[in-house]
Amino acid sequence: MEVNNSLAPSRFFIFINNELKHALECLQRIRFSSDVLFATFFAATFLFTWSSALKGGNTCVNDKSCDYGSQCGTCTVNVSVSSRCIRVQPHNPIRKVKGLPFNRYSWLTTHNAFARMGHKSDTGSVLLAPVNQQDSVTSQLNVCFSSLSLSELSRKLDFKSRRLTDTLKQSCLLFVQNGVRGLMLDMYDFENDIWLCHSFHGKCFNYTAFQPAINVLKEVEVFLEANPTEIITIIIEDYVTTLSGLTKIFKAAGLGKFWFPVARMPSNGSNWPTLDSMIQQNQRLVVFTSKSSKEASEDGSDGMRSGSCPNRAESAAMNTKSRSLVLMNHFPDTPDYVDVCRHNSAPLISMMNTCHDAAGKRWPNFIAVDFYKRSDGGGAPAAVDLANGELVCGCNNIDLCKDRKRTCDSMECFNN
């Protein structure tokens, strides 16, 4: 996090004190073996590192030299191009303005969240299906500040177990639950169960099957159980024909207690319940399916052509006002790990503006992308920050919104 250089010294220390207070509140949730003095020292040291780190788009040497929520990388196969800090984490809008309706926020969403690079099919077969993400669902949901680099940490972690591994507990100095909050999952009937597959023609095969859906749903359950103020949205591309198959699998994963009831979903384009209400009632899992017979999906767009924002066949027209939420899909039919850097950069913001006009001047509540960590700087997190700023207070960045006030304050922008 880079502090605006125009801040006066007194304002700078007010900023640091506020951030230190928030960090200490987070640290209270972590069991340190040492005393409070060490925790205070750690928080102060960590915050000083944040304030002096490089922001998104700046050249860097390694992950540690970048701002928190960023990693050091390159958006090209050209080895002569210098690495830059690339944002992988949006700013949490709830820290700025709380208590608004659910449809007044925007969330980073991962397309085919389960289709991870390096994953081997649980069928034991060679997996020939395309992949769309770099890390596991657990990693997408949790942001871990570690003494290790992101690449070192990912090599050490095993996210298949139901609980976080000892390596994760030892390596992560501080968790910030502020990452991906929307998961797109393709569910199929397969092997007398429901599986996550990246397949075709509505059928799952050994070579397109990743894993049983309950595995990923249990990862979501672990996250929601550990984070009682977080809300997750699951958007299902639904090929399940088994009677009550989805209901059974969600309950088996322990997610029934978090389910947001369909009866509370507005049907006439009106506001959703507030986040506070959803959290207080523990209705923190919102689920949509592509089959209208089960539950009508919200708005969507899947165009990648500049200046065009069409809706998906199963969705209502983009400019309809009978839906309260807008989903913007920004990914090609075939995922491309190299070219996605371009897709997730300036074209993403441009498409969001195009879809804003096509959707009746509404900003997206879910921004879905492939390889959300890939861009030439701000990427998908910056797009989410822009959408949240417009939805929450009418500013072009959530960092410009004053706490609990729908007004802008350029002095509170972190320049990210």
Image: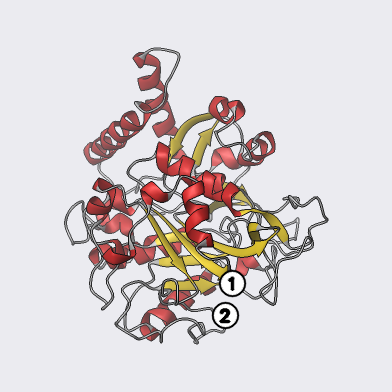
Relative height, residue 48 to residue 100 (above, below): above
Q: Residue at x 75, y 60 (%)?
A: 78
Quarter assignment of residue 61:
top right
Label annotation for residue 29: none
**Count of number-bearing discs:** 2
Residue denoted by label 2:
304
Furthest-left residue in view?
405
From where the camera sits, is residue 98 visible? no
Quarter assignment of residue 189:
bottom right
Label annotation for residue 331: 1
Q: Are marks 1 and 2 in contact (CB under 8 Å)?
A: yes
Q: Amino acid at mark 1?
A: Phe
Residue 34 at x, y percent in the picture: 43, 12
**Secondary structure state at the residue bearing disc 2:** loop
Relative height, residue 303 to residue 44 (above, below): below
Relative height, residue 189 to residue 282 (above, below): below
Relative horizontal placement of residue 130, taking residue 71 as reference (left or right): right
Relative horizontal placement of residue 113, taking residue 123 as reference (left or right): left
Quadrant (top left, top right, bottom left, bottom right) of the N terminus: top left
Q: Amino acid at mark 2?
A: Met
